[in-house]
Image (tube, grey):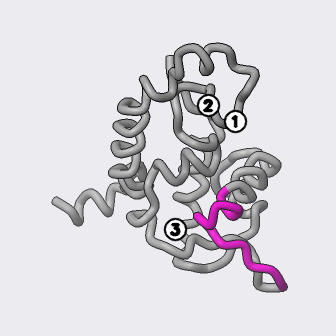
Amino acid sequence: MLKLSKLTDYAVIVLGCLGQQGGRPVSASYVSEQTKLPEPTVQKVLKLMASKKIITALRGANGGYVVPLSLACISIADVVEAIEGPLQLAPCDNDTDNDCLLAKLYAPQNRWNKVNIAIKDTLDKIRVSDLMVKTKKEMKETV
């Protein structure tokens, strides 16, 4: 079974919390308190997402973390790649892993490339905002 780590799910939760701040920078401890996730986990997720420019880390007395874009502009593919690394089903690569005999003999990444592209395309179409749970008030407003 193809499975993402819990960190990817936590990243979506953390983004949801940051997205509710209206551009106001918040600390990792604040995000931890709001999401009920352990602070070291939140710090790790924030660091990974900041390194991939999904969120912005601001220094100083009024610093913290912000989402520079709307959650509707951030794809799940971006989040998955920030947390998990490049999306690919075949772990071997002829150009980078000389120890992988399977890659040398069969080049599995070429065989799975269509699947990799389909998964990435699908995840590119899903936005973080699509995974956010709407409040009762928001649901009434959309009806």
Which residue appears farthest toward the left when viewing the image? 143
Seen from the viewer's position, the closer of residues 18 and 124 is 124
Callout 2 secondary element? loop
Q: Please give left or right for residue 55 compared with residue 133 in the image.
A: right
Whether 67 is drawn above or below 3: the answer is below
Type of amino acid at the residue the image marks with label 1: Thr
Measuring 44% from the left and 71% from the top, which residue is drawn there? 70
Q: Residues within 10 Å of mark 2 (few under 14, many from 20)?
A: some
Q: Please give left or right for residue 111 compared with residue 63 in the image.
A: left
Residue at the disc numbered 3: 20
Could you tell me residue 47's position as x and y percent?
75, 58
Q: Please give left or right for residue 138 compared with residue 109 in the image.
A: left
Type of amino acid at the residue the image marks with label 2: Asp
Callout 3 secondary element? loop
Specify start and end residues of the magenta stretch as a single range.
Answer: 49-60
Q: CA distance from mark 3 to mark 1?
A: 41 Å
Residue at the disc numbered 1: 96
Measuring 23% from the left and 60% from the top, which residue is drawn there? 140
Q: Quadrant of residue 138?
A: bottom left
Whether 91 is drawn above or below 139: the answer is above
Determine contact: label 2, label 1, CB under 8 Å.
yes
Residue 105 belongs to the span the image colors magenta: no
Whether 62 is drawn above or below 29: the answer is below
Determine contact: label 3, label 2, CB under 8 Å.
no
Residue at the disc numbered 2: 93
Whether 90 is drawn above or below 84: the answer is above
Q: CA distance from mark 3 to mark 2?
A: 40 Å
